[in-house]
Amino acid sequence: MAISQKISKFLSNPQNFTYLILGIYFLIITGLIFKSGIVLGLDVIFILFFFAALFIGRWTIFLKDWFPFLLMFFAYEAMRGIADNLAKSVHIWEMIRVDHFLFGQLPTAFLQTNLWEEGSLFWYDITSFFFYLSHFWFVFLVGFIIWLEKRGYFKAFSWSFLILCGFGFITYLLFPAMPPWMASSYGYIEEVKRLLLEVGKGLNLGAFLTVFYAWIGPNEVAAMPSLHMAWSWFASLFLIHIFGKRLLPIFIIPLGLGFSLVYFAEHYVIDLIVGIFYAFFAFFIGKSFFREASLTRDLKQL
């Protein structure tokens, strides 16, 4: 079959054509972001999802399915921003000792000593930066894909994700933990830099476009567990469970993110391990919704 015939056959399917347009839409948005040096806040990303749903004529269903989830998620985000104010003490040494026990040294210090060169950016610095940025979109893009293709699973995905966030928040309250870059700034460990800021500055990226997050302060002592890793691992587990093992290579995203978190001094390795445990826990909770989900019509059947 000629290439032109294959293209015509592909585009003759309304669903394929819709996804092609959505792909072009998100590529254009991504290009504009990098050209302007702006990083989108999660609230802005959800607005883009809404416009995508509006374009394909599913905006009312989008609001019905996503509004309760987003309301709960942003309530969690607001609480997370004040969790560090409620902490009476911050844990410092536990994570340091575990990483030393596992590796004989701090992996962050080892990576920065052998890879980081002041004033220069190498391919692994840039790649790590973009893996780090996946934290802001990957889990929610997975949710959007599930909503488009397998709407019946979206309830299981969204509510088990909120459970994951809730357990993370409780842990932050009970066990506020100092990240490596902060521990270094206070002299508890050898010198390591917060390379996220260094690389972002070198790439001329870092302006944060947001509405909601302008009113929320970050929680600087939320290292344990790493919800960066937990979110990404959780999303990958759901993708593979729903769409099959052919998507196993998607785990390159959480693995790349994990490398960047340690290299950039945002987390200890033990933070990532506990984050993965939390992800599995939330995923197995989510599976309890699957029987109900399988009885729900997919969005494309409406």
Image (cartoon, helix red, strand yellow):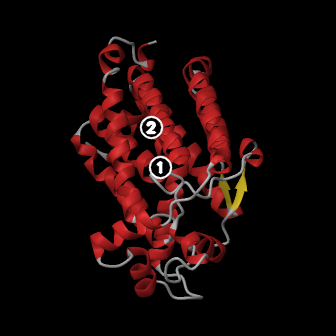
**Residue at mark 1:** 227
On screen, residue 285 above or below 39: above
Asked if disc 1 and disc 2 are in contact, CB closer than 8 Å, the reply is yes
Determine the residue positioned at 32% across, 41% down: 280
Q: Residues within 10 Å of mark 1 (few under 14, many from 20)?
A: many
Label 2 element class: helix
User: Toward the viewer: 219 or 20?
Assistant: 219
The image quarter in which residue 68 lies: top right
| Three-letter amino acid code at the position of disc 2 | Leu
* First in sequence: mark 1 vs mark 2: 2
- Where is residue 107? Give x, y as percent: 38, 75
On screen, residue 100 above or below 42: below
Q: Residues within 10 Å of mark 2 (few under 14, many from 20)?
A: many
- Answer left or right for 148 relative to 54: left
- Where is residue 239? Give x, y as percent: 34, 38
Q: Which mark is residue 164?
A: 2
On screen, residue 38 above or below 55: below
Determine the residue positioned at 69% across, 64% down: 37
User: Toward the viewer: 17 or 114?
Assistant: 114
Residue 13 at least partly seen: no
Determine the residue positioned at 50% across, 65% down: 92
User: Toward the viewer: 219 or 296?
Assistant: 219
